Image: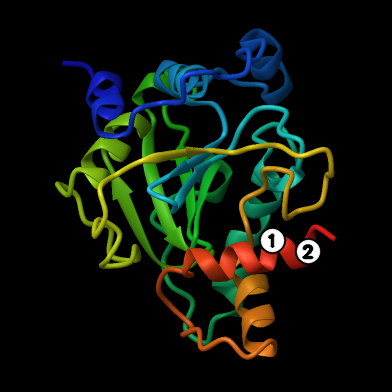
Amino acid sequence: MTALTALTGLCPPPAVVRPSPDWLQVEDTLGKGLPQDYKELVTVYGPGQFSGFITLYQPHAPSEWADLTGPMPARLRGQIEEVRQAARCPWRLPHSPENLLAMGVTGNGDYLFWDTQPPDTPDEWTVAVNEALDAPWFTYNGSLTEFLVSVLSGITSVPMFPKDLLNHAPAFTPTVLASSTSAADAGAPVSTRAIRDWANANGYDLPERGRVPIDITEAWKRENSR
């Protein structure tokens, strides 16, 4: 059984997915090849969230916050060392920032990266997860699809992910793009910091860590799509 077959068994993909990107153009824009399993994921699933928590960046997404080919990957790569140096006791980075390519984000603001080594063999790239560009880091020695299967089936526990992630059966929720291009409805990964600040300012009881309840996220989207 392939990892993609296992993932579609855990999280059935949507019946209708938008046309696949021109992968040659995408790779030309990035200046590097991409793992075959990622291309298959995008083709089969399109934009959306796994278990209401993990969002993968998409090529040419309508918002820069979710765009694999936009400024976010380079911006995050540049901020990693800045965050480390700003800490009172800078820690040792487990991956060289120049080798990291951001390709996803979680509902808690944790980032998913590929460690792009070896550079000419993308199918051998491993997955790195980190907590809001801060320590700690978690490394998964396998493909992105294998990572999703392992996490969503409960085999792998990522320390910075919420303990209740698997309280409900794994599912994939496709993003529905509206005509507006605001951050709330353009398919962008929602900034949990923005939601928490808004929620606290509007009388919601929301702790600093853990998953943001769906009803609060939806309330934030309604407020910010006006």
Give, as a three-letter code, the residue at label 2. Answer: Asn
- Front-most of residues 194 and 119: 194
Q: CA distance from mark 1 to mark 2?
A: 5 Å
Q: Residue visible at 43% across and 50% down?
A: 95
Q: Is residue 35 above or below residue 139?
A: above
Q: Which residue is mark 2?
A: 224
Classify residue 141 by image quadrant: top left
Would residue 108 be visible to someone looking at this image? no
Q: Quadrant of residue 216?
A: bottom right
Closer to us: 135 or 26: 26
Amino acid on which disc 1 is placed:
Lys
Residue under circle 1? 221
* Image location (x, y in percent) of residue 6: 22, 25
Examine the rendered structure and indicate whether residue 89 appears above or below residue 183.
below
Q: Residues within 10 Å of mark 2 (few under 14, many from 20)?
A: few
Q: Residues within 10 Å of mark 1 (few under 14, many from 20)?
A: some
Disc 1 + disc 2, Cβ < 8 Å: yes
